[in-house]
Image: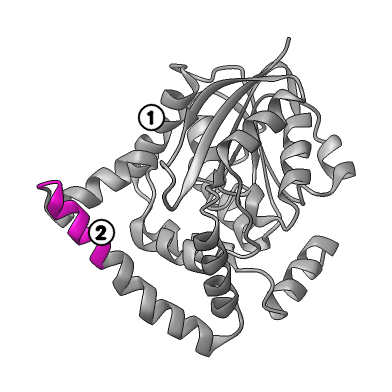
Amino acid sequence: MSSETSAHRDEVTAGQRFEFGANWAAFLSVLDDTRIAEAERSLVAKLGRDRLDGVRFLDIGSGSGLFSLAARRLGATVTSFDYDPQSVACTRELRRRYFPDDAAWTVTEGSVLDRTFVEGLGTFELVYSWGVLHHTGAMWEAIGHAADRVAPGGQLFIALYNDQGRTSRGWLAVKRAYNAGPLGRAAVLGAFVPYFVGSFVAGSASRGQTPWTALADYRSRRGMSFLHDIVDWVGGLPFEVAAPGEVVAFARARGFTLELLHTVGGALGCNEFVFRRAA
């Protein structure tokens, strides 16, 4: 057992960390070609590219492996890693299914907070970490380590939970309850799955959509699953947040310019940032 696996297990047992990999393993049962195609489309759209041929792509916190797979199908040479051993297994499973024995896709286990580990990976034209760095327990350090892996002239694409002030502190309490044990998990899911589903149905109706059309739209954003994302949200611990201006200032101080900013408008969810490092 690696030191990362042992540390991860201890954190889960202590109620300090959500088992993201278990949720991603369930997600793989609904993964299909349509979802993969939507992931590809969303990736290149945000980056302002048509393809990723010849691009060295680092996926920090690869999770299900969906976006590593998307990058590889778009022509990138991919390095994927995750701290959660089940997430590593999910990414390896997608590599086995779609790119068996492929020398251009490496999957490994490691922590973005381990400077020696990440420095050993080298630098990349594109560093990607969507909805991950705020789950490390040391978000700003993690962002700094991710930024350091970007080659001169390369891009950094990250997504981070939006800072909602008191509301964010309330969600932290929910996540702690979820991870405290089976009773807390059941209580949180019993309360919040109906809440999110009801809100989703009401929101779709207000837009003149059926729930099924709205679900198709949700999937088209990144190829993800609404129900699996709910579990990820209510359970996701560690949990930190950041205001958009804080992230932009942090990156600019490290020689990056902002190319794209997509915010959730002060609401629940992740703000997306694409930065470019000075050449």
Question: Is residue 143 highlighted in magenta?
Answer: no
Circle number at residue 59? none
Up-down: is 224 above or below 11?
above
Pick the quarter of the image with the N terminus. Answer: bottom right
The answer to whether residue 66 of the structure is visible from this angle is yes
Q: Which residue is farthest top?
A: 279
Report the span colored magenta: 198-208
Up-down: is 46 above or below 203?
above
At a point 38% along the width and 29% down the height, the residue shown is: 41
User: 198 left or right of 135?
Assistant: left
Pick the quarter of the image with the C terminus. Answer: top right
Quarter-of-image position of residue 124: top right
Q: In terms of secondary structure, what is the magenta stretch mainly?
A: helix
Of residue 17 and residue 33, the one placed in the foreground of this image is 17
The amino acid pointed to by label 2 is Phe
Callout 1: helix, strand or loop? helix
Residue assigned mark 1: 41
Q: Position of residue 224 (x, y in %)?
A: 39, 49
Question: Is residue 204 highlighted in magenta?
Answer: yes
User: 171 left or right of 7?
Assistant: left
Residue assigned mark 2: 200
